[in-house]
Image (cartoon, rainbow, N blue to C red):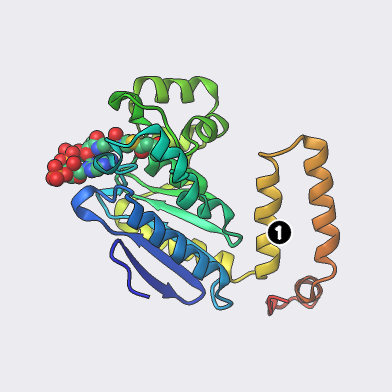
Amino acid sequence: MAYNCLETETDDRVQIIRLSRPEALNAFNNELMNELTDALKAADADPKISCIIITGSEKAFAAGADIKEMADKTATEAYLEDFITSNWEQVTRTRKPVIAAVAGYALGGGCELAMMCDFIIAADNAKFGQPEITIGAIPGAGGTQRLARFIGKSKAMDMCLTGRMMGAEEAERCGLVSRVVPKAELMDTAIEVAKKIAGYSRPVSMMVKEAVNRAFETTLAEGVLFERRLFYSVFATEDQKEGMKAFIEKREPNFKDA
Ligand code: CAA
């Protein structure tokens, strides 16, 4: 499928989705978000795909929601069109693992979209921020909530109240990103990581994602119970039998996503 604001490519069992509105540093207008929703749904439904990467350009992952598109919006319009919720939430509804590969600016909605992914690999030139306060707004795609969970109250307050940017090194130090790599190695690393995940059993990797995400939605006791139920259910998969047999026979497993 051809998109105006995205470039898509598959590499083995990995779907790469590149945000591409260079004239606006990949700011999220409605067209881009509708296309992203469509591309994510397609990748999630495609049995040949096991892991997804969302990335941008070297200069910008994304500079946030499109300020020009939303500047004159009324509250009633935002409410009636279900602004943000209607076409941003697919990222969190995607069941296969989604990696954000971030170079350059990830600001406002750009930082929020990266945080909706399962983890973030950052280039050393990445800059994260929630600068909405500088334009008389507050984060609207989960920034105050997810940033506080990622990096704690003090730093989240600092970021959202001052609107300052955080570099890749600080982002790794405070747990916003899982690893930092030189800018030139970002995509190679992200693809290598995605292929590693895609090499495991797809139902099992999806269960891992579901279980970790539950940690952010429930109490420890309920989360552990949820994990335990999923753990029991892996014994119903052929891939668990194959994985453990392969270990015992000292060979590589041949997972069948079954
Ligand atoms: N929306 C619309 N257009 C944007 C944009 C945005 N968020 N960010 C950048 N652009 C456009 C600029 O208007 C400019 O277009 P023109 O050439 O037509 O003027 C082009 O992209 C290049 O941008 P700059 O000239 O500003 O580039 P720069 O290198 O000097 O600065 C920047 C880069 C620091 C990222 C700066 O563009 C910037 O501050 N952008 C806005 C960041 C921001 O406030 N994001 C939050 C948006 S609100 C939000 O996201 C709400 C939410 O929670 C959902």
Residue 85 x/y as whole percent: 50, 45
Amino acid at circle 1: Met
The image position of residue 148, as x and y in percent, is 54, 29
| 179 or 77: nearer the viewer | 77
Q: Secondary structure at mark 1?
A: helix
Kindly identify which residue carries mark 1: 207
Give the x, y percent position of residue 187: 37, 61
Label 1 crowd (10 A; few <14 / some 14-19 / many >=20): many
Task: Name which residue lies at 46% across and 50% down.
Answer: 88
When asked about the image quadrant of residue 135, the answer is: top left
Q: Quadrant of the N terminus?
A: bottom left
For ligand 1, give the image quadrant: top left
Residue 49 figure quarter: bottom right
Asked whether, in this view, residue 81 is left or right of residue 216, the answer is: left
- Identified at 76% across, 76% down, the residue is 246
Identity of the residue drawn at 75% across and 75% down: 250
| In the displayed structure image, the side of residue 193 where residue 35 appears, left or right | left
Residue 134, compared with residue 199, is above or below; it is: above
Please say whether residue 168 is visible from this viewpoint: no
Q: Vertical placement of 62 versus 186: above or below?
A: above
- Is 61 rendered above or below residue 73? below
Residue at 80% from the left image edge and 72% from the top image edge:
237
Residue 208 place in picture, x, y as percent: 69, 56
Q: In the rendered image of this protein, does residue 170 appear above or below residue 258?
A: above
